[in-house]
Amino acid sequence: MRQTLQDIAAYKPGKRPAAGQVATRLASNETPFAPLPSVVRAIAEASGDVHRYPDPAATALTDALADFYAVTPEQVSLGCGSVALVEQLLNATVDAGDEVVYGWRSFEAYPVLTRLAAGVGVPVPLRQGHLDLDAMRDAITPRTRLVLLCTPNNPTGPALARTDVVRFLQEVPEDVLVVCDEAYYEFVTDPAAVDGVPLLPDHPNLAVTRTFSKAYGLAGLRVGYCLASPTITAAVRKVTLPFSVNSVAQAAAIASLAARSELAERVATVVAERATVREALLRMGFVIPETQGNFVWLELGESTVEVAEAFEADNVLVRAFAGEGIRVTVTEPGETARLLESAQRVARLLPA
Ligand SMILES: *Cc1c(COP(=O)(O)O)cnc(C)c1O
């Protein structure tokens, strides 16, 4: 085995219910809503063709995304979930020993994928749950090839402000690729928050990744995409495993784009719940940064494991990071009620 593997902790996915167990599943930032009927129909139709390889260029989906975002198809690349796009962007830019700057704590896949690409991760501590762009800029060296900006930041919740990202892009050397990982973009409601897409024309070293897994509810089918300059896009496509977005996933993603107004209603439900959940938990004494994703972050320090076990005893599955805190997915009113009922009991464990 490669020596590197000894230094890499395996990716730890969110908890799933045991076989036969019914649980409130708030550990993986999934949508609670079943796929829309039009999407299920597209999946059923596509299933009749699975004896054929998919369109390797995913032409119809690429064109639909280019249309949707008013970019050219040469600016759209696809992957098996947007986590694969992060991997592809790393593989396209990082040689052995090159540095990759990211905030920490942020998406758990960043350090793992950086090491697998033979890069050196440079984690920059958050400031009160926010990415610290000044410190991230100062962390850039001549060896830095890529900077990962997770906005909204998973697991803490805050989104970066557009003005701060624009300034950051002006300060970063042009040969450093800046990636805005916008997996939760559809849940963002703060008008000051960054949307990377309109910044693309002025910044050829910017890439924006998004996904069908979260707001669009296709986590099980694995489709993500990257919007960037034609040069970056060509490089990302070069390192993509052939046929990595399967034909059923391509069809479901196209149908989901067409159903976006129905999906927007579901997003609005989650956004309304987000305010309800955060306010209720703050009243119970939890400490929570502002959030623009479909999740809240409970800062719990040394109480984290005890609190997570108490939620689990109530069959509420959450994502715990020992010594730091717990990420709880926000979903719909029924699950909010179960979460808050459990939280009421759990809050007794909070340090006074
Ligand atoms: C969930 C998530 C992703 C990607 O999810 P995919 O299912 O691979 O599309 C990417 N980045 C962040 C920060 C996420 O939380």
Image (spheres, rainbow, N blue to C red):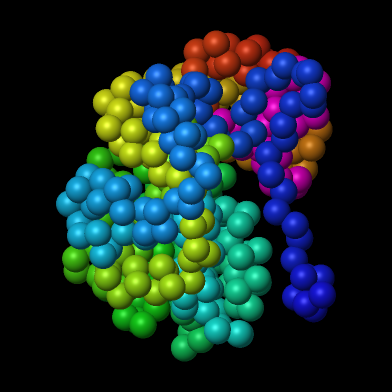
Quarter of the image with the N terminus is bottom right
Task: Tell me if I can see residue 304 in this picture.
Answer: yes
Along the viewing direction, whichever of 250 and 9 lies nearer the viewer: 250
Asked if the stretch drawn in magenta spans residue 312, the answer is: yes
Can you say which quadrant of the picture contains the C terminus?
top right
Where residue 229 sits: x, y (%)? 27, 69
Q: Which residues lie in the magenta part? A: 307-329
Which residue is found at the position 26% from the left and 65% from the top? 74
Direction bottom: furthest residue: 142
x, y (%) of residue 230?
Answer: 27, 70
Q: Residue at x 78, y 18 (%)?
A: 20
Name which residue lies at 70% across and 28% down. Answer: 317
Q: Nearer the viewer, residue 270 or 21?
A: 21
Q: Position of residue 114 (x, y in %)?
A: 60, 70
Identify whether 244 is placed above or below 99: above
Near-viewer residue (36 or 184): 36
Height in image: 9 above or below 2? above
Q: 233 left or right of 25? A: left
Position of residue 261 in the picture relative to residue 19 (left or right) = left
**In this image, 65 relative to 105: left or right?**
left
